[in-house]
Image: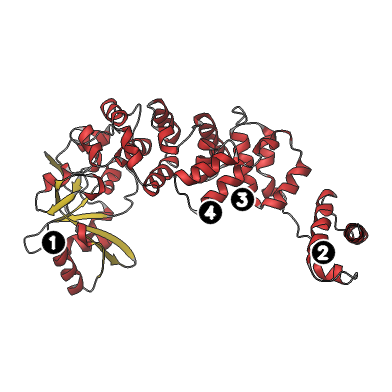
Amino acid sequence: MSAEPILAGAPWLTSGGTARVLELLNAGGDEARVVGGTVRNALLGLPPGDMDIATTALPEEVVRRAKSAGIKSVPTGIEHGTITLVIDGEPYEVTTLREDTETFGRKAKVVFGRDWVKDAERRDFTMNGLSVDAAGIVYDYVGGIADARARRVRFIGAPDQRIAEDYLRILRFFRIHAAFGTGEPDRDGTLACIRGRAGLATLSAERVRMEMLKLLVTEGASAAALAMADAGLLQATIGGVAYTGPLTAMIAIERALGLQASATRRLAALTVAVTEDAKRVATRLRLSNAEAKALDSMGHRWWRFAAMDEARARRLLYRLGPERYRDRVLLGWARADGEVNASRWRELAELPQRWTAPKFPLRAADFIARGMAEGPALGHVLTLAEDAWLAADFPRDDAVLDSIADQAIARVTRDQKN
């Protein structure tokens, strides 16, 4: 065990809501510390992120003290000892120290305790097992300081045992390494993940989705996906073939264009070659409707961009809208044999920045004025006219628009007679 004042004076620890919560709970013989990812991030020079606080005070006592101090408390997980305190609109998750009495995945039986060592030992990785008190003293019972500084992700204790407690830790191992690790993933941890991979089938789709989407936006997403594929873990996770090459290309393309990392776009690069893949992945990971539709759109004939001129691209941009258009272009680009710097792909991808699709200038009223009655035929004639307008490259000239409208009416009328 080591205790070092290496975060003394940290602004997020000495002022604001965190300092207020620690002061509230460091009384009456109880102790509170900031734990987990916040401490890890601070050691790595990263923003603290979500604030998780552990305390020896029982949940009911946390609620009582919050009420006395005029602080709102929400019992977000009171059965597991977790109370969320809200200060100035910011949440602070407070959890009573716990010890596992039986471990079987997410349903582990726990009892509340006062032992900081046992609380640290029940966590997943050494760099996540750190805690810091109000004075900035970091407590390390599991070797987390050295591992954090070396950017080395290791399981606390026996990796096989920690994985058997919750098989989601297989995905978390690669996700945490992708975000905070360097070099190859820890060998002992990787081998334990391989030995425990059958347990992935027991996880809910929602939990797998959450971990995968988080992993895909990390700095080391490409290397982590390749490591998972080499270990035989990726196919079991996504339920089909994985395309690590296009994922690597997609990440490079996003960076080249200055785009924010998109988990959905990267998931498409990793998993989607055709729309059938999109449907499979949406089912396997139980994606949201918006995510499923985005994958389906990207997978729809993305290969046509390989020979697409700008006129056709403008028509597609009009049909899809800027976001769906760009994402489909980027998937085509990512799958185009690594042509990351190809100027033509960049021109297609940046089309929405230099050209805004006009609105279709003809309306139902224009056709009613020409004698069309309301009903299905009116909808049909509008569709024909819009298609002709697109084929003519978005004309604005009134004479051309009149001709398009008249020809659409003539065609519908002819079809009705036949």
Q: What residue type is labelled 1?
A: Leu
Q: Which mark is residue 290?
A: 4
**Residue at 25% across, 42% down:** 128
Q: Which amino acid does label 3 sit on?
A: Glu
Which image quarter holds the N terminus? top left
- For the residues labelled 1 and 3, the Cα–Cα distance comes to 49 Å
Q: What residue type is labelled 2?
A: Ala
| Upstream in sequence: badge 4 or badge 2 | 4
Would residue 416 be visible to someone looking at this image?
yes
- Which one is in front in this view, the residue at disc 1 or the one at disc 4? 4
| Upstream in sequence: badge 1 or badge 3 | 1
- For the residues labelled 1 and 2, the Cα–Cα distance comes to 70 Å
Q: What residue type is labelled 4?
A: Ala
Residue 50, position in %: x, y? 32, 53
Disc 1 + disc 3, Cβ < 8 Å: no
Report which residue position mark 3 lands on.
323
For label 2, the SS is helix
Q: Quadrant of residue 371?
A: bottom right
**Residue at 63% across, 36% down:** 332
| Upstream in sequence: badge 1 or badge 4 | 1
